[in-house]
Image: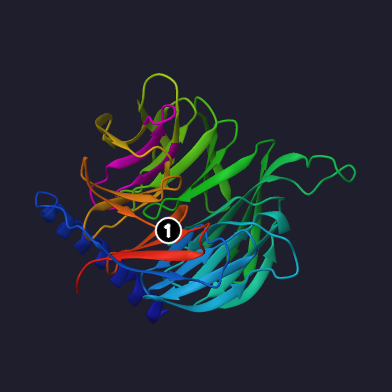
Amino acid sequence: MERLVHTAFRLFSAIWLTALLLAACQKAEPRIPVVLATFPVEISGPTDIAVNPDTSYVYIINNANQVSVIKDLNEIALLETDSDRSVNNIDMAIDEVRGWVYVVNKYSDSVAVMRDTEVVAVLETAGRQPHEVAIDPQSGWAYVVSPYSRKTSSPGERPTTEGNVTVIIGTEIIGTIPLGEVRATHVVADPVHSYVYVGTVWGTVIVLKGMEEIARYETGSSVNAMDVNSQTGDVYVTGGDQRLYRFKQGKLVDDVKVMEGDGSIGNMQVHPATGDVYLVTWGGFGDTKVVVVRGSRVIASIPVSASSSKMDIDPLSGNVYVADFWNDLVTVVHGTEVAATFETGWYPYGVGVNPANGRVYISNTNEGTITVLGFAE
């Protein structure tokens, strides 16, 4: 218990120190990283990335039940998350306080639980095709959302639509929350007030507290992205209606129109220090922008290369890194302007920032390599 309290206090202090430093440097010239290395990894087809800043382990997943673990500029382990089944790992979450790493295995209906460089358990989820996992840092509970129940009439038929949430801590399943006839595909946890928000294909946002459902809200259309302001606990939700919805302490408080005309929102992330929301919008071929929302208004619409999608934010420098998988580029946005563009390997897909040192890890999926950006020591 003493170790957990110490670690939690250290993480809390680091977040606020980072916020103060970033607030001071936002007015200064942006820091531009350099390419530190591009190196091959044993994992084939690397995709999404998660970073544990407490250990500096970088976890990279692919679509063939594998996780590569990187430390600094070296691959130190290759793990099988569910080796006797055909799976598709599509989401990860890290409990920085307790050291657990959760990897969702969509097509084996399971969650692999890791610690450091070892798989310690594979747990079967309550529902079929689990999509995402989020952690409430206060309780340590991991919430895994699944859009379907296990009820099937006969082989080849579609599974019954019945949303489920499997709640895990460490290597134990501690409960299941049935959601009814909704396809739950997204989840995010408010680290300040311990609310958990579940997004569905039909636009319903379900609010949980612990094991209890406390509210449901209807947005304009299907939920396609969710994120949280780690300082305030405000949760942001986007859908196909091109609006950004803000929730606070379990309640829907406001929304803002993000873009006009045809198009969609491809991704979203909240800046951990400024609270600004960065969204990747697609308005048609060649019309891709990073839209910045502050409060209830759009303050910038920044053109970027056509197939930009995944992104991550460095709280140390304030840089926003956006990967363009079609043109093999990563764009660096600082504030409301493009600060730099870097060439990567073939088909850069995942982006992960280590906030402890500002290093940026980019998975080049079709090349089997990792590009690392960073600053001089």
Q: Is residue 149 left or right of residue 281?
A: right
Residue topped by disc 1: 345
> Within the magenta stretch, is there residue 354?
no
Q: Amino acid at mark 1?
A: Gly
Say left or right for 367 vs 193.
right
Residue 320 on image: x %, y %: 29, 50
Viewer-side residue, 7 vs 251: 7
- Which quarter of the picture shows residue 119? bottom right
Residue 35: quarter of image: bottom left
Q: Residues within 10 Å of mark 1 (few under 14, many from 20)?
A: many
Region rendered in magenta: 266-287
**Which quadrant of the rendered structure holds the N terminus?**
bottom left
Where residue 280 sits: x, y (%)? Answer: 38, 38
Q: Residue at 58%, 52% (x, y): give it.
A: 211
Res. 144 in view:
yes
Left or right: residue 341 compared with residue 158 = left
Quarter where residue 90 is shown: bottom right
Q: Position of residue 276 (x, y in %)?
A: 27, 42
The residue lying at 69 percent from left, 50 percent from top is 129
Residue that lies at the very extreme toward the right in this rendered image = 154
Was residue 272 drawn as part of the magenta stretch in this picture? yes
Residue 291 in view in this figure: no
314 and 325: which one is in front? 325
State the colouring used for the structure image.
rainbow
Q: Nearer the viewer, residue 267 or 367?
A: 367
Q: Is residue 98 above or below residue 130?
A: below
* Residue drawn at point x = 35 percent, y = 65 percent: 372
Callout 1 secondary element:
loop
Residue drawn at the location 60% of the way across and 63% of the way down: 168
Seen in the image, is 220 located left or right of residue 160?
left
